[in-house]
Amino acid sequence: MIVKKLKRTSFKKSKAVMIGGLVDYILASHDEEGRDKLAFAGSRNFLTTTVAAQKREMISLAEESIQSRMPVTHWILSWQENEQPTRKQADEAVSLFLRGMGLAEHQTIYALHKNTGNYHLHIAVNRTHPYTQKVIQPHHGFDIEAAHKIIAEIEYKQGWAPQINARYRVNEQGYVVRNLQHREQIKPRPGAEDFEDATGEKSAQRIAQERGHAVIQNASCWEELHAGLDAVGLRFARKGSGAVIFVGDMAVKASSVDRNFSLSKLCKRLGAFKPGYYSQRTFKKPAPEPVSHVCREEWQEYQKERQRLAEERRLAEKKREEEWESLGQRQRERREAATARLARYGLSILNIARHFLKEQEREEQAALRDRQSQAEKPERLPRFKHWLGKRSPHLGNLWRFRRRIAPGVEVRKRTFPRVGTLASPYAAYREMVKKRFPEKMDASRLDAAIALYLRCAGYTPQEVANEVFRHAPARPYGQSRDERIEYGRRVVGYAFGTAGDIDIAYTQPTEEKIQKFNREAEQIERERTGQVTQEKEQPARRVFRLR
């Protein structure tokens, strides 16, 4: 699971507008593209029962806390592609999260969304206590660290797969402990990451972190720091009471590279600040670098297209400026000629002429402005992921999963020869997978693993979909037919989609491995059917059609 806290970045809107918009977004049944979004929703600790009344109640209580500019916090919990939480599991996750944050008695509105490849849970919690009206600061401001501990607890209790680089895990005794395999990664801030997602290009902040972090951290004096940064094409300079690191002509706050790199902390370690002398190459803008090895060739094509459109915009802007300069030149020449011709008739005639010339100039300027606004504007390049998705959905998904794909791992669409001979293999494969993975595993995660094994055994997506639809155990509290179809579609979508391709690329199932687990499943099926002494006549099978 992934946890994310969304921070309020603008304070131009009032609390009522911000909270109302957040609640409306969380509880909306469809997204901006018209897709079904809301799986289900819930609320906690309200006096009222309707959505409109609960929204007003949350706004009213938030406005009582004048010491906090935004007491409502927005969290997102996201599951992996092969995991589908039930309503009971989502409710339990909310309870565990609020309890771990010390907000169990606070107003909360939450909703599970299904409009993306990952089920994700939005939680809007009012940190203002409904009775004491005090604003709670969970864990004295270290709430993100606490959230990662809560996530580890939820994963352990419900059987979800932890992230590869998770900060915490649950040990054999059931205690949440630090994950020794976790490597703390220095990442750019959200604004820089959004730039990278949009362009596929490394941000200046990431370049400063990758090139300059070790240099600054290991420097023993200011001279060594400046020399090391100069060698990697960076510059360190003082700005006001702080410091910045220049990547070409782009300034990056030193503290954004590492909190320990603020000017005050560096001065404590290295002494009073001393400016450095840098070579001319550090002042040049560095060439764009791809942020990932995934889709590198496509990124290079995207960069060429981006540069072409940038040149078109520059030429269009230059043309507009030339048109304004040309108009201004004509108007000046006309004014000068009129002034010279009419000066002998006196000031009154001259002022009348100036007035009408001014009106004529305004009309010409308005006409030029309208003509430029109606002119065809240069094409805007879409975000890199959308550009990739238009070329190929597979490429778009590869970019989406780029953080999972290590260099050297080849992810491709693979087809497997049919080795499975079972007419109805679900039950046998279920037992085989449970033997191979004895740890606690949620039912949806188990079904996704079964579907992936069936794919490797050569079964088609339609056959796997039929098996899941017919034989997968019903979810708690039952499932409607549409819900069961949606469940099966997501299971098959994972197994035969890009996420399944990535898992297959890492496991590298050879023909021998496939034959081995298929023989194991067939042996389980023989043992299972041998125990059945009498079978009732079965009704006609229902078939789930993939759409």
Image (cartoon, helix red, strand yellow):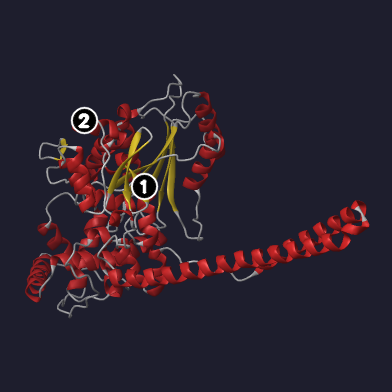
> In this rendering, which labeled residue sits more in front, label 1 or label 2?
2
Residue 224, position in %: x, y? Answer: 17, 42
Compared with 336, 21 (above or below) is above
Residue labelled with disc 2: 271
Left or right relative to 498: residue 511: left
Say which amino acid is labelled 2.
Gly
Q: CA distance from mark 1 to mark 2?
A: 23 Å
Q: Give the secondary structure at mark 2.
A: loop
- Does dot 1 land on a helix, a strand or a loop? strand
Say whether disc 1 or disc 2 marks the residue closer to the N-terminus.
Answer: 1
Q: Position of residue 332 (x, y in %)?
A: 73, 62
Residue where numbered disc 1 is placed? 251
Residue 176 rendering spot, x and y as whole percentages: 17, 36
Image check: 271 left or right of 523? right
| Residue that extends furthest to the front in the rendered view of this protein | 344
| Residue that appears at 39% across and 27% down | 105
Q: Are marks 1 and 2 in contact (CB under 8 Å)?
A: no
Quadrant where the image shows the C terminus: bottom left
Q: Callout 2: few (<14), some (14-19), or many (20+) C-alpha neighbours within 10 Å? A: few
Residue 309, horizontal then vertical, whole percent: 47, 70
Indicate the amino acid at tag 1.
Answer: Ala
Identify which residue, 421 or 22, lies in the foreground.
22
**Which residue is nearer to you in this view: 310 or 322?**
322
Q: Is residue 237 above or below residue 453?
A: above
